[in-house]
Image (cartoon, helix red, strand yellow):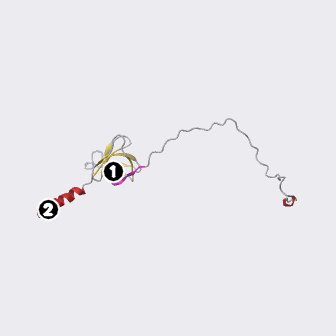
Amino acid sequence: MRRNLFIILVSFALSACGTIEVFNHDSPPEYLTVRKAEFFARGPAQSDPPQSIAAETRVSVLKKDSGFAQVRLPDGTKGYMIWTDLKEAPPEPVEVPFDPVIVEEIIEVPLPDLGAIPAEVPGELINEE
């Protein structure tokens, strides 16, 4: 009986460990930091204080493991961040090249004379003073 209980407890303990997800290092998914986040350059258990990463910083996620993500910062530095400090990034906007319209000839149109009375207005509507 004790052996069965031990096996059940061990299986629960192992199932509580998060699964490891490894992403493609050539084109990893992009994430943004949700808020000012901690960055651990040497791993989550480093002895010195973590660096701070500004909110809305775009990072590449290389691996997800046990509540932490191994990330690559925009400058190429690799380290670890807390998974809940990240959110999926929207795709990068596509840059559209500037193509000005070429105008070959400018046609000047005279402004209308707002004081003139059109010929089709009936005489009784004209207020002559």
Q: What residue type is labelled 2?
A: Asn
Image mark for residue 92: none
Residue marked by disc 1: 38
Q: Where is residue 70 in the image (x, y as percent from the top left)?
A: 31, 46
Residue in the image at 33% along x and 50% along y: 38
Q: Quadrant of residue 60?
A: top left
Q: How crowded is mark 2: few (under 14 residues within 10 Å), some or many (20 or more)?
A: few
Is residue 117 shown above or below 2?
above
Q: Where is residue 36 in the image (x, y as percent from the top left)?
A: 38, 52
Residue in the image at 27% along x and 47% along y: 43
- For residue 26, side relative to residue 12 (left or right): right
Residue marked by disc 2: 4
Residue in the image at 35% along x and 49% along y: 52
Q: Which quarter of the rendering shows the C terminus? A: bottom right
Q: In which quarter of the image is residue 15?
A: bottom left
Residue in the image at 63% along x and 36% along y: 102
